[in-house]
Image (cartoon, rainbow, N blue to C red):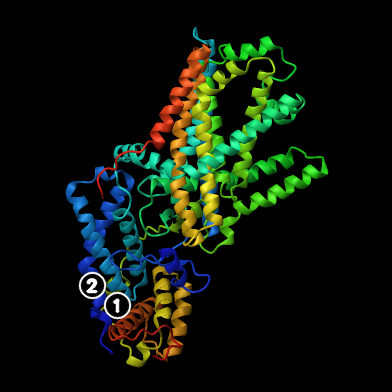
């Protein structure tokens, strides 16, 4: 039994990206796995950063080497070349490993896309796992590239061409592996026992009720029937509308709510004020019912 | 239920007001910890993290059950997740971890891979034998086996004197450091390839090893035909004892992964692959260290030491050292 088994049976419905991760304290954190687009975006960003860094280093090495050749000790140029060769190898291999071993467990590209690497079993992310998932990049990226390179090199011979094509299909399977499973695991993730999850850095915005509290002296009063016309789903939609404060949307929403609950507009009543007041009443009613164990999912939910 | 909404005093609001300061504090500490190292935190902050983490978790449970402010629930989810990864993340010191790796983890995992290691060694040396026999029988095979890129002008048409020059010359115009670093990056690439290809059901790893074996065998046959077998052995084994061992171990690591993916045993395929992958990655990390060593031997020792006897002595010593380090039984450190 492992966490990944749990996840398979639990988590959201089919096609959902939510996965269960129960902490030792017994709370399900409901991790969201990164989708293919985010993963690809992060990889492209990382490759770009890596290319820029390596390009800059190479440029510096060239300038230094040229300078050393003209200096009284030209043999130093060879040492420079040795340092460059080693540096190239170390940087291109260590980039992913060092960043993923850091406290955020993410490369810069992943950070920008809001992703991080985590162990699938919910345990610690070990150095071995990070090492394994990055060593596997060899067959996921460079193997297909080699076959593409071979085909570009111009295999005129039809048999050789067919072989290259076969190789491309075979290695393409590794490159496209994340698209073939629902956890978006790449080969490296599979071998290392890791996966890539969203690491949202949520900001705590003000409670909408605070804003309401300040502004109003003569609040609107709703009957129990009016305040109970909707469920949780509509409340959340209303919350989003109110946080966005787009006047045209608010006007449309206010009209629909007024129509549904049969509200007769008080004189000089603004749409915004009406929605604020209605949000407070609806949330108060739904939360009170929630305390008694009734969770009204949406307006069609009779319970 | 028509209470004036001017004085809405929901439980969910009170709940938030009472705990918000804790959440904010946790957020600040986590931000600090994620930016720098845990060492940048004050003692009291470090001590506060587990407590605040549990506050966040319990807040999350309560909020899910009672609050309908969904930005609040989202915020708590992300906060609790961040704190979880920090609290249960890896935090051993780098020095300690390295020491543990070289004293215990690495030799133990290499030892555990003895079966795969034997298979890889058999494939490599078997292929070398085949390469030797082929070229010894018909020198025409040499061109087919050794790619021109690797031959570096050494082929059946080369004069004996020129072949000898390669063995004892100082490595041409390239400096020792350059040779060493080139050799290291090249071989480390091969070892990582051997590891990664293992996932494709072992076969490509074995092919890679066999290909390298063939090349070596062909080279030996070429030199043997001129009576230079013994000097070549010294030239190859100075670093080869370490380098071939490292490539064999890299192949063994790959083989283990492919084998477990094919035959997971009692575990699920996914779990078996993950367990094998982590163990194999431990072996591979050590292999990279071995290859640094081999690169130094090839770049410096081979060019500076030109006596056959000394070369064989170095080869025998390094091989014995590796074998002893990996396979000699050692006392277990207490029972944990």
Residue A81 in view in this figure: no
- Residue density around tag 1, few if under 14, some if 14–19, many if 20 or more, within 10 Å: many
Q: What residue appears at the point 53 percent right and 13 percent down from the top-left corner? A: B308
Disc 1 vs disc 2: Cβ atoms closer than 8 Å? yes
Give the distance between the C-alpha atoms of the residues marked 1 and 2, in whole angstroms.
10 Å
Q: Which mark is residue B66?
A: 1
Residue B62: percent from left, percent from top: 27, 73
Residue nearest the observer in this picture, A232 or A206: A232
Q: Residue A50: percent from the left, percent from the top?
A: 51, 39
Q: Is residue A13 left or right of residue A290?
A: right
Q: Chain of mark 1?
A: B
Please provide percent x and percent y for residue A191.
50, 52
- Left/right placement of residue A264 relative to residue B1 reads right
**Residue under label 2:** B15
Visible residue check, residue A102? yes
| Residue in view at x 30 percent, y 64 percent | A24
State which quarter of the image contains the N terminus of chain A.
Answer: bottom left
Q: Nearer the viewer, residue A251 or A115?
A: A115
The residue closer to the viewer here, A238 or B231, is: B231
Where is residue B183 shown, x and y percent of the image? 54, 26
- The residue at 33%/37% (across/down) is B103
Q: Looking at the rendering, which quadrant does residue B40 occupy?
A: top left
In this image, A210 relative to A69: left or right?
left
As drawn, the label of residue B177 is none
Depth check: give the residue in front, A67 or A89.
Answer: A89
Q: Is residue A51 above or below residue A130?
A: above
Secondary element at tag 2: helix
As drawn, B29 above or below B153: below
Q: Are marks 1 and 2 on the same chain?
A: yes
Q: Where the C terminus of chain A falls, by quadrant?
A: bottom left
């Amino acid at each position: 039994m492992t966490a990944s088994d749990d996840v398979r049976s639990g988590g959201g419905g089919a096609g959902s990206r939510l996965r269960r991760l129960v902490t030792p304290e017994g709370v399900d954190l409901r991790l969201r796995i990164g989708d293919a687009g985010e993963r690809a975006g992060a990889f492209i960003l990382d490759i770009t950063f890596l290319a820029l860094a390596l390009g800059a280093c190479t440029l510096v090495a060239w300038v230094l080497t040229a300078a050393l050749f003209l200096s009284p000790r030209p043999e130093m140029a060879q040492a420079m070349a040795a340092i460059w060769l080693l540096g190239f190898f170390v940087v291109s291999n260590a980039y992913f490993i060092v960043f993923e071993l850091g406290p955020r467990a993410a490369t810069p590209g992943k950070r920008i896309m809001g992703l991080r690497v985590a162990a699938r079993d919910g345990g610690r992310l070990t150095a071995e796992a990070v090492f394994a998932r990055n060593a596997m990049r060899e067959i996921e990226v460079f193997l297909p590239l080699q076959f593409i390179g071979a085909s570009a090199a111009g295999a005129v011979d039809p048999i050789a061409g067919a072989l290259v094509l076969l190789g491309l299909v075979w290695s393409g399977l590794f490159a496209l592996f994340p698209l073939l499973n629902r956890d978006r695991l790449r080969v490296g993730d599979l071998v290392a026992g890791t996966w890539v999850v969203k690491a949202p850095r949520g900001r705590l915005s003000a409670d909408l009720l605070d804003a309401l509290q300040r502004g109003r002296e003569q609040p609107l009063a709703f009957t129990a029937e009016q305040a109970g016309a909707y469920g949780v789903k509509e409340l959340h939609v209303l919350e989003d509308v109110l946080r966005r404060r787009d006047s045209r949307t608010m006007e449309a929403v206010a009209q629909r709510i007024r129509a549904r609950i049969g509200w007769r507009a008080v004189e000089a009543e603004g749409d915004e004020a009406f929605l604020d007041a209605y949000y407070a009443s609806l949330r108060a009613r739904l939360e009170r019912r929630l305390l008694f164990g009734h969770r009204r999912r949406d307006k069609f939910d009779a319970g | 239920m028509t209470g004036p909404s001017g004085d809405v005093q929901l439980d969910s609001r009170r709940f938030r007001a009472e705990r918000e300061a804790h959440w904010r504090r946790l957020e600040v500490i986590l931000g600090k910890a994620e930016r720098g190292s845990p060492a940048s935190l004050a003692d009291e902050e470090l001590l506060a993290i587990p407590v605040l983490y549990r506050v966040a978790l319990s807040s999350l449970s309560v909020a899910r059950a009672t609050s309908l402010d969904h930005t609040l629930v989202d915020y708590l989810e992300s906060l609790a997740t961040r704190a979880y990864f920090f609290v249960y993340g890896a935090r051993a010191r780098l020095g300690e971890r390295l020491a543990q790796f070289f004293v215990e983890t690495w030799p133990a995992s290499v030892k555990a891979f003895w079966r795969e290691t034997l298979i890889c060694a058999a494939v490599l040396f078997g292929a070398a034998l085949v390469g030797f026999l082929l070229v010894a029988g018909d020198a025409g095979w040499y061109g087919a086996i050794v790619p021109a890129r690797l031959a570096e002008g050494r082929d059946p048409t080369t004069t004996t004197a020129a072949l000898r020059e390669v063995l004892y010359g100082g490595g041409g115009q390239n400096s020792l450091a350059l040779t060493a670093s080139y050799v290291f990056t090249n071989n480390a690439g091969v070892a990582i390839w051997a590891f990664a290809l293992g996932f494709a059901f072992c076969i490509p790893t074995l092919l890679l090893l066999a290909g390298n074996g063939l090349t070596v065998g062909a080279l030996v046959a070429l030199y043997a035909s001129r009576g230079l077998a013994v000097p070549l052995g010294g030239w190859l084994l100075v670093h080869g004892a370490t380098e071939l061992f490292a490539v064999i171990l890299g192949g063994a690591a790959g083989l283990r992964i492919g084998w477990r993916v094919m035959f997971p045993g009692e575990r699920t395929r996914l779990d078996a692959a993950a367990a094998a992958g982590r163990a194999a990655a431990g072996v591979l990390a050590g292999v990279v260290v071995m290859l640094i060593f081999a690169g130094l031997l090839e770049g410096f020792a081979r060019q500076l030491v030109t006596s056959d006897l000394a070369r064989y002595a170095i080869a025998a010593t390094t091989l014995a050292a590796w074998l002893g380090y990996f396979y000699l039984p050692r006392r277990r450190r207490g029972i944990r």
